[in-house]
Amino acid sequence: MAARQGLARRDFLRSAAGLAGAGMIAATPGLRPLRGLETSRRPKTLVVTFGGGARDEETFAPEGQENIPHLLNDLLPRGTFFTQVVNHGILGHYVATASLATGAYETLNNFALAAPQNPTVFEYFRRDLGRPAQDAWVVAPSNGFNRIGSSDHRKYGEPWGAEVLLPKQMLAAAMGAKSSLDYEHLLQDNYESPLTVSTSTATAEDLYRTAELLKLSYSDFSAHAKSLSSPDELSVFIVHRLMQQLAPSLLWVTLHDIDIAHSGAFSLYLDGIRRSDRLCAELWSMVEADPEYKGRTTMYILPDFGRDSDVDAGGNGFQHHRTGDALSRTTWMLVLGPGVRQNVIVDRPVDSLDLVPTLGARLGFSTPFARGRVLSEVA
Ligand SMILES: [Zn+2]
């Protein structure tokens, strides 16, 4: 079933505008990519994950392609696309994203403020390469992601972790005593289950320090936030600030708007898909427009997992991801950047855990506790 899904995705792409025929080749494992663009400057990495994936019916299938024009026409032709990325872990967003970040299936409680058990990619990166704290950042959608920057692992842990930014938490603090009504659309948290996590996990000093680092006054920030239509737009705004002010080498952003599907509103789910599609293209445009990033940045785009099919009696279609069936586990990944072959589709099944070892292989750090395998097509 998972294999069929991946192959169907490949076929959809073959029929999509802009990707038909010309230049598209199927990659074979072991083939080395070109490395024509090596520079003396440090490589940059931007990982974009989606919390709450979308189904092919609303994306890659012919009837869904109108929702993802940027992915199909702007980004896919520039990168290597894996049609079959299978998540064998727990289908909750925090635990699944933590698993993507450690390269091992985490078993932590999805709804608790727990650190991953295995070292994160941020710890491997910073420890092996001797990078300072401000070189690795996570921008995450909700308070539940507070601990994703570092594990409890005794050989690694917090001294080597990433800085975690929760834009909604910053906004809540920036608003202070002011009415939150103007920003309610940006402060919705966790569509999946009521998770009550106090925002007091970050101190006022932490937030002040972050705002200073980003050269963001509270009044400017809240004024700008007011013009934004969604939490993901707020996250992308913060990512842009991070790039401009600190130019970190390893930047991880988790988008979450699509997961509004849990509300059962199909139109809002589609809006989330279209917005995510546009924001991915905007992120790549930010990379291309910034001399610190242009030509040396590899971007990885992948949903954490899928959503339920319409036919599974145990589910409720697009709304949730509770059945654990093949569709809710099979997703995809797009990789683009220097040395990554363009307009290439990889059909073989790969694992969600393969991301971290692949990042290690590309950037030159070891990932001893990750269980995945290096994706030779892009490493
Ligand atoms: Zn969800």
Image (tube, rainbow, N blue to C red):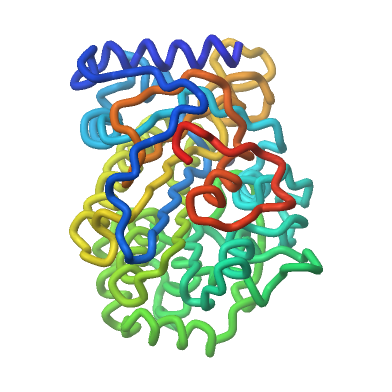
**Observer-nearest residue: 31 or 91?**
31
Please give the name of the residue rendered at 29% of the width and 61% of the height, measured from the top-left corner. 293
Q: Is residue 54 left or right of residue 355?
A: left
* x, y percent for residue 124: 63, 61
Quadrant (top left, top right, bottom left, bottom right) of the N terminus: top right
What residue sits 32% from the left and 46% below the top?
Answer: 338
Snapshot quadrant of residue 304: top right
Q: Is residue 308 visible?
A: no
Vertical comparison of 246 with 326: above or below: below
Q: Give the residue at x 29% y 32%.
A: 342
Does any portion of residue 104 appear in the rendered image? yes
State the residue in front, 166 or 35: 35
204 relative to 265 in the view: left or right: right
Above or below — where is 296 with respect to 74?
A: below
Q: Position of residue 352 (x, y in %)?
A: 60, 36
Q: Quadrant of ligand 1?
A: top right
Q: In the picture shown, does residue 122 fall above or below 130?
A: above
**Left or right: 318 as drawn, with respect to 81:** right
In the picture shown, does residue 293 fall above or below 358? below
